[in-house]
Amino acid sequence: MFRKVKEKNILTQRAGIEKVIFGVFFAIVCIQVVTFLIPLFFMVTNSFKSSMDFLRSKLWEFPDKWIFENWKEAFLSLTSGGTGTKKASFVVMVWNSLWQTCARATILALTPMLVGYVYARYDFYGKKTVMAVHLFTLTLPLFGSGGAYMRFIRGINLWDSPLYFLLTSWNGRSPGVFIYSAAFAGLSHAYKEAAELDGANRFKIFLSIEARMVAPIFWTFFINNTFGLWNDYINILLYNPSYPNLAAGLYTLGVQIDKAGGNRPRYWCGLIIASIPPLVLFGFSSDLIFKNMALGGLKG
């Protein structure tokens, strides 16, 4: 009979000092998680308070009466949360968030793939210099160029236009270029040679074979970009105020409540509702992000 071998965890395979280091970092992560969950807990519990109950009670106190109508009224009270020349309803802001996030995340994940493929598969004069300049530009601070960039966007008639997101998202200077380049360089040339024997050209090889083999990297970039773009309100307020997404609308409404007052619990209901899509996406994609992915398909 075969005896079942108990699989060892990661700590049993470490030395004494390594176990201490792992324990310290685990404690730090736990503290950080708690610091994130406590404000979220306060926001959820206070979202069930009435406006008067919220003003006279402490933040950590539970509601005297749980107002579930706040969640229903959140959709109605946030209909005026638009910015710019056009006021947008809650549904319109959600729609703007969806198409803007999906379009920008796709382009931002695709562009470095194309540049990385050129770096990995083509030899050209000055290639090392171009890559060195590319790497150097990633370290340059660009915060002082906001005024000139705004004037440029207005000059080419992209300000307050949906085309702004589609055209300015083609950014080939992101750090992801070098990740894609390393991934393409690590692919075996046997795939390309086998496809060339079948008469495939370079474009077909890239589209049908090599791009599919690095697809997990593409989806990882897409998902990571989605988390940041869903909450992006600065680009909306500065460059596209007539097409507010949910983050821009909620930000504007929050500023209005701070200045003129309003129903803060219902506003928090809107914030919680806006956080549901990223949480759902993370729940379905966490394995793809955190687990190691092996690429292969050659027969030995």
Image (cartoon, rainbow, N blue to C red):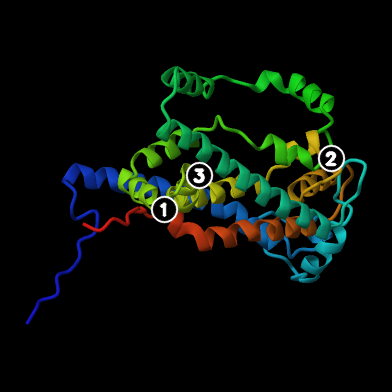
Whether residue 106 sits left or right of residue 48 in the image: it is: left
Residue underneath mark 3: 203
- Residue located 29% across and 46% down the image: 22
Q: Is residue 264 visible?
A: no
Whole-angstrom CA distance, mark 1 to mark 2, is 36 Å
Local SS, label 1: helix
- Residue located 76% across and 37% down the image: 164
Q: Is residue 70 visible?
A: yes
Q: Position of residue 47 (x, y in %)?
A: 73, 61
Local SS, label 3: helix
Local SS, label 2: loop
First in sequence: mark 2 or mark 3? 3
Q: Is residue 148 above or below residue 120?
A: above
- Mark 2 against mark 3, which lies toward the viewer? 3
- Residue located 87% across and 63% down the image: 76
- Residue located 38% across and 47% down the image: 196
Q: Position of residue 68 (x, y in %)?
A: 76, 71
Q: Amino acid at mark 3?
A: Phe
Q: Amino acid at mark 2?
A: Pro
* Badge 3: residue crowd in 10 Å (few <14, some 14–19, many ≥20): few
Residue underneath mark 2: 241
* Badge 1: residue crowd in 10 Å (few <14, some 14–19, many ≥20): few
* Badge 2: residue crowd in 10 Å (few <14, some 14–19, many ≥20): many
Residue underneath mark 1: 290
Whole-angstrom CA distance, mark 2 to mark 3, is 39 Å
User: Which residue is more in the foreground, 186 or 229?
Assistant: 186
